[in-house]
Amino acid sequence: MAGSVVIVLLAAGEGRRFGSVKQLADVDGEPMVRRSARRAIDSGAPVIVVTGADAERVEDALTGLAVHVVRHAAWAEGMGSSIAAGIRELRRHFPHATGALLCLADQPMIEQALFEAMLTRHRVAGDRVLASEHDDVMGPPVLFPRDCFEALVDWSGARGAHALLEHESARVERFSSHGSIDVDTPDDLQRVRAAIGSTSRETSV
């Protein structure tokens, strides 16, 4: 697809702090990775999912979804390595992409409005780096324009793309997000489940 943003959903980690493969944790009746992938697909952008730890089970959880899966053998090297794998796959399959929207599979509460706002802004300001912000902390989802691909394709380290955000700070735009909560521990999962349940009850009233 020419001239488009591609979503790169990172789902390769082993969930060390969580105690198991958190991508498969149940969130509102489905595996967390599937929920995150569905929300990404709903944005209308192509979606690449990077798998790694327990790849077969994670990929099984994505069965039937319109996503492109890349299995990253070196996932244990850290999130930076998984980002690089996703960008390499993006460049192979979407050579005319204008941006990469990096998302995490363990953020199952990302608002659809956030995706829409970032994609809309990219269409009119394609040179900007767009980052979500929660409690004054920047992080994923983050949209990097095409001219950042060369740096990201060789990325490494455990901190994801924070160093590139810092390097490009002069052109970063922030988008407030209340849904960019990482599920790192079982307690985080319980908070997310409670919040989603509360939202569902409010919607049904």
Image (cartoon, helix red, strand yellow):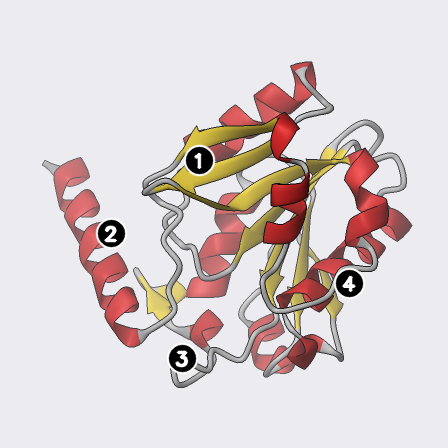
User: Mark 4 or mark 3, which is nearer the start of the sequence?
Assistant: 3
| Label 3 vs label 2, nearer the camera | 3
Classify 10 Å Cα crowding around label 1: few (below 14), some (14-19), many (20 and above): few
Q: Are marks 4 and 1 in contact (CB under 8 Å)?
A: no
Q: Quickly name the residue at label 3.
A: 17
Q: In which quadrant will I find the C terminus? A: top left
| Label 1 vs label 3, nearer the camera | 3
Name the amino acid type tagged 2: Ile
Name the amino acid type tagged 4: Ala
Total numbered circles: 4
Residue 77 appears in view: yes
Name the amino acid type tagged 1: Gln
Q: Quickly name the residue at label 1.
A: 112
Residue that extends furthest to the left in the rendered view of this protein: 205
Residue drawn at (37%, 64%), measured in percent from left and top? 183
Q: In which quadrant will I find the N terminus? A: top right
Q: Quadrant of residue 10?
A: bottom right
x and y, in percent, of residue 42 in the image: 53, 39
| Label 4 vs label 2, nearer the camera | 4
x and y, in percent, of residue 155 in the image: 76, 60
**The label number, if any, that marks residue 125 in the structure image:** none
User: Mark 2 or mark 4, which is nearer the start of the sequence?
Assistant: 4
Cα distance in 3D space between marks 3 and 4: 23 Å
Q: Quickly name the residue at label 4.
A: 85
What kind of element bears circle 4? helix
Classify 10 Å Cα crowding around label 3: few (below 14), some (14-19), many (20 and above): few
Q: Is residue 183 left or right of residue 68?
A: left
